[in-house]
Amino acid sequence: MNNLAAKVDFAIFIRTTPERCYDALATANGLDSWFTHGTLLDPAPGGEILFRWKDWGYEAYTGEIPGAVIAYERPGKFAFRWRADSGGYDSVAEVTFEPVPAGTLVRMVEQGYEDSPAGLQDLVNRASGWAQALTLMRFYLEHGVRY
């Protein structure tokens, strides 16, 4: 695996404002309204993040992932570093919120995966995870549906 090319790059159109999208993904209350349970987020570069889930999804996942805020530029960009699923290193996720006609284009780019079998598995997990999470966020923001 070429570490420079290994990244998640996912975009989704959401029929609402960049501010609503940003608040849903870049604030603890916003995340807890549709995705996490008890997340902590200090909204400033260098601030800590602790994503938390309790009995989430079909497999009833309970756990937490620590990280740190890199960029907090409402409503345009949110970036953070967080622990990879395998636990041995951090990856960096950057989300941009671009106003487009009738809504917002939310783009997630995550990179920094290890060049190893565990790193490849982390990449696969995050690619599928972000696709699911951002789709859930879309249903929440557009229709009020919460998983």
Image: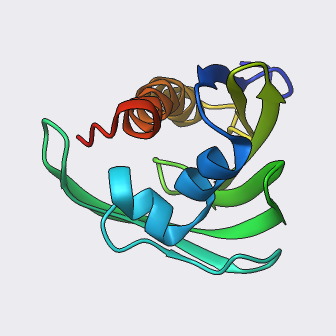
The number of discs equals 0
* Quadrant in which the N terminus is drawn: top right
Quarter of the image where the C terminus is located: top left
Give the answer, above or below, for where 85 lies relative to 135: below
| Residue ID at (51%, 33%) | 126
Q: Is residue 71 left or right of residue 112?
A: right
Say whether residue 126 is left or right of residue 109: left
Q: Provide residue 78's location: percent of width, then percent of height.
A: 76, 54
Viewer-proximal residue, 65 or 139?
139
Q: At x 35% / y 50%, what residue is drawn?
A: 34
**From this viewpoint, is residue 35 visible?**
no
State left or right for residue 64 relative to residue 105: left
- Residue drawn at (81%, 33%), measured in percent from left and top? 98
| Residue at 60 percent of width and 35 percent of height | 16
Q: Relative to residue 92, is residue 139 depicted above or below?
A: above
Image location of residue 118, percent across then percent down: 51, 35
Q: Quadrant of residue 108?
A: top right
In the rendered image, residue 97, in percent from the top left (x then y), is placed at 76, 39
Q: Is residue 5 visible?
A: yes
Image location (x, y in percent) of residue 83: 57, 58
